[in-house]
């Protein structure tokens, strides 16, 4: 569980990032989750964009993705979700203590 200071720090780091994935008409499916899982291991912090033609609610889909990948939902703004998960082998982000 991330503290408010840690979320604030991650939001600052995520601001300049471009979305790595886009969710469209097909929505969230198993192959999509596997790809997110792989990229989270490499990058730790990613953005996912929900296109206007998707039937998914960004907040609900973000929660589902986090539950299935064991990640943390940092924030959802409009059609964009930011996810964080500590990498086992490629640790790049040092979170502030509390």
Image (tube, helix red, strand yellow):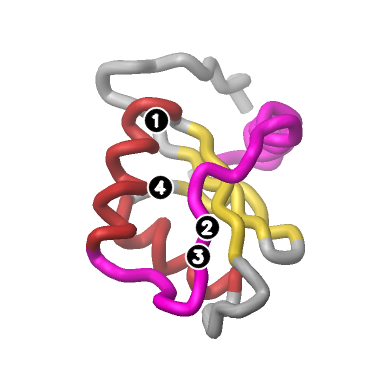
- Asked which secondary structure carries label 3, the reply is strand
Residue 15 % position (x, y): 74, 35
Cβ atoms at labels 3 and 4 below 8 Å apart:
no
Residue labelled with disc 4: 71
Q: In this view, does 32 lie to the left or right of 82?
A: left
Quick one: label 2 or label 4, which is nearer the N terminus?
2
- Name the residue at 75% across, 65% down: 78
Closest to the camera, between mark 2 and mark 4, is 2
Q: Distance between the residues labelled 4 and 1?
A: 8 Å
Residue labelled with disc 1: 86
- Asked which secondary structure carries label 2, the reply is strand
Q: How far apart are marks 2 and 4 (CA)?
A: 18 Å
Question: What segment is highlighted magenta in the picture?
Answer: 2-30
Q: Distance between the residues labelled 2 and 1?
A: 22 Å
Q: Which disc, if any, is residue 23? A: 3
Residue 17 % position (x, y): 66, 33
Quick one: label 4 or label 1, which is nearer the N terminus?
4
- Name the residue at 36% across, 48% down: 36
- Asked which secondary structure carries label 4, the reply is loop
């Amino acid at each position: 569980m991330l503290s408010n200071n840690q979320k604030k720090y991650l939001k600052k780091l995520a601001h300049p990032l471009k979305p790595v994935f886009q969710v469209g008409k097909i929505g969230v499916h198993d192959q999509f989750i596997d790809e997110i899982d792989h990229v989270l291991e490499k990058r730790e912090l990613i953005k996912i964009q929900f296109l206007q033609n998707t039937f998914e609610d960004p907040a609900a889909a973000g929660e589902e993705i986090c539950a299935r990948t064991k990640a943390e939902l940092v924030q959802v703004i409009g059609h964009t979700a930011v996810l964080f998960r500590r990498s086992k082998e490629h640790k790049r982000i040092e979170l502030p203590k509390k």
